[in-house]
Amino acid sequence: MNANPNGERLRNLYQAFNRRDIETLLTHLHPDVEWPNAWEGGTITGRDSVRSYWLRQWAELHPTITPSELTTEPDGRLAVEVHQVVRDLDGAVLVDASVVHVYSSRDGLFDKMEIRNTPTVPQALG
């Protein structure tokens, strides 16, 4: 990712996600964050809801997200091209795709994220 000052924050966010470090992840999010529920559908609001969502997801899937390029949108939001690989708990690849995550921030924390070019992710396994 480029030298944008928010690039380091985003890099830390993705690293924490890939480590399953929920506490570090949540420190990057605004208390009233709006987050896409790409796995089950819809949107969730608030850190506690995001925590529950990720913990449910990680109990059934093993997603890994690698950011590659950061750009700033005309409206100031940050767009991050990422490569995501989602595996089931036995290691079989369910999704291998590139998407774009778009972030807005408030009070120095990410308060909304949207996903562009969302691939289909299985809702339940087995």
Image (cartoon, grey):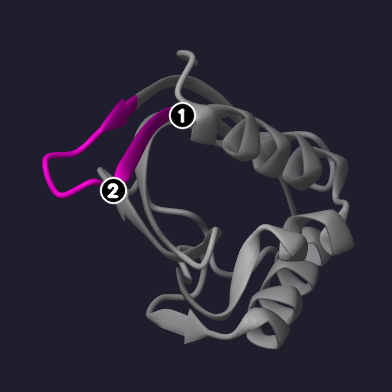
User: x and y percent of residue 40 in the render?
Assistant: 49, 75
Q: Residue at x 45, y 24 (%)?
A: 4
User: x and y percent of residue 60 in the render?
Assistant: 77, 62
Give the spatial CA distance, label 2 vs label 1. Answer: 16 Å
- Reply yes or no: does residue 85 show up in magenta: no
Q: Is residue 80 left or right of residue 56?
A: left
* Quarter of the view holding residue 27: bottom right
Q: Is residue 46 above or below residue 55?
A: below
Q: Nearer the viewer, residue 104 or 42?
A: 104
Q: Is residue 90 left or right of residue 64?
A: right
Alpha-carbon neighbours of circle 1 within 10 Å: few (<14), some, or many (≥20)?
some
Q: Amino acid at mark 2?
A: Arg
Quadrant assignment for the C terminus: bottom right
Instruction: Specify the label residue 82 is tagged with.
Output: 1
Q: Is residue 68 left or right of residue 98?
A: right
Q: Which residue is mark 2?
A: 77
Q: Give the structural element (helix, strand or loop) at label 1.
A: strand
Instruction: Specify the label residue 53 is tagged with.
Output: none
- Reply yes or no: does residue 72 show up in magenta: yes
Q: Residue at x 74, y 65 (%)?
A: 26
Q: Is residue 53 above or below residue 7?
A: below
Q: Is residue 104 above or below residue 15?
A: below
Q: Nearer the viewer, residue 99 or 21?
A: 21
The answer, for residue 86, to whether it is visible in the render is no
* Quarter of the view holding residue 70: top left
Q: Which residues are magenta?
A: 71-81
Q: Residue at x 75, y 56 (%)?
A: 25
Q: Amino acid at mark 1?
A: Val
Q: Is residue 120 left or right of residue 117?
A: right
Q: Nearer the viewer, residue 103 or 21?
A: 103
Residue lying furthest top in this view? 2
